[in-house]
Image (cartoon, rainbow, N blue to C red):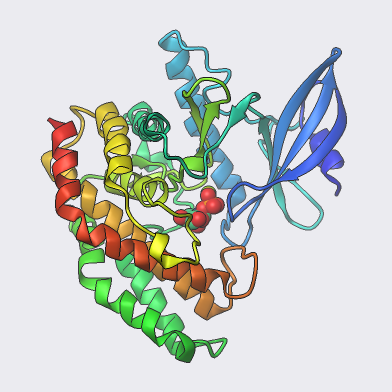
Amino acid sequence: MTIKEICERFRICGDYTACTQINNGIINKSYLVTYRCDGQERKYLVQRINRAVFRRPDKIMQNVVGVTEFIRAKMLAQGIDPERRVLKYAETADRKNYVLDSEGNYWRLYNFIDDSVVYDEATDAEIIEQVGKAFGEFQNYLSDYDAGSLYVSIPNFHNTRRRYDLFYEAVMVDAEDRAGKVKREIDLCRSHETLATKLSIMAENKEIPLHVTHNDTKSNNVIFDREEKKALAVIDLDTVMPGLVAYDFGDAARFICSDAPEDELDLSKVKFNLEKFRALTKGFVGALKGRLTPIETDTLALGVYTMTVELAVRFLTDYLNGDTYFSTNYPGHNLDRAKCQLALADSVYGKLDAMREIVREYAK
Ligand code: GN1
Ligand code: MG
């Protein structure tokens, strides 16, 4: 099916005029489509859900529609116009929020939030604070959402202990005969294991409460207004599942508080930046004030280290498995990503005490 044919299955106003592929995320494929409706241009985002990653896209859609409609209702009740603040998924004639094409792919369509930008990186403290605030508020909106009703889209997604098990399996199987070349990185991952698996073990032992969390809190999953430095909406909700506050905070920090991109080759540039961290903490912890338990506050900094190591382990596992999970731009991309996250983990580790101090300051 063509993108146009897919769009035509959704109940949206007007005629299809154009389509361009856009790059957002390394899991799903996205297209920006333009429609003409009553003489006006309308934009939508059409997305093909990655079937290898998400086994039941129909259930994912139940999650994301459930969550977005819940947030929309709250916004309306608070007198906030939800138009540019939360995604609105279109329906087909038979009231489904997806189209299943002849090849078995699932597609969804939602309103594109116009005059907006996302930030893959930021040095501006105001923007970073807004990223933190957006993810903190997202958790606030969902604090009374029925977690039990959520389909677990990727079981053990942030179970770092389990990620290590899969990693060791990949090292053993060594499907692509690559383990010999990356002994150093394998050993580095191993050196982080005890501390990086601490949170997942505490979670398993129910020492830290679970909430409805986003679980993929890269800054480019927050839509900003193009003109004002204001976060509008949180997107990419496929991994909304019960999780730890520290996962969301940690993943956001490892991404936006690094001084280099996630796959930087020059490792001397890969440093965790405490000023950026202060801004993120101000936004995130500020939004969740009064809701965080003491143990949650205590584990936020560890969450940053954990998420950084976990992603290093995931990238290296995928490299060993033959790059079957993350999409890559060149051979060895996943290995470069892993090296970068390992360098970042070292930098984070050296700053944990200072980070705890900053978290405490804003949690007061
Ligand atoms: C993936 O799709 P995207 O780019 O938002 C991944 C995250 C990783 C991230 C690393 C479902 O997110 O967990 O942190 O890549 N999402 C999934 O860039 O695995
Ligand atoms: Mg994603």
229 above or below 333? above
Total residue callouts: 0
Question: Quadrant of the image for the C terminus?
Answer: top left
Q: Is residue 169 above or below residue 117?
A: below
Residue at the extreme top of the image, as rendered? 79
Q: Which of the two residues, 316 or 97, is positioned nearer the viewer here?
A: 316
Whether residue 3 can be seen here? yes
Q: Is residue 119 left or right of residue 284?
A: right
Most foreground residue, 59 or 164: 164
At horizontal 20% and vertical 47% (from top left) the residue drawn is 355
Q: Position of residue 233 (x, y in %)?
A: 50, 28
Relative placement, left or right, of 307 versus 180 is left
x%, y% of residue 334? 53, 70
- Residue located at (39% from left, 65% from top): 268
Considering only vertical position in the picture, is 149 above or below 267?
above
Query: In the image, residue 269 lies at what x, y percent?
Result: 41, 60
Q: Which picture quadrant has residue 340?
A: bottom left
The location of residue 188, given as percent across then percent down, is 32, 77
Residue 197 visible, this angle: no
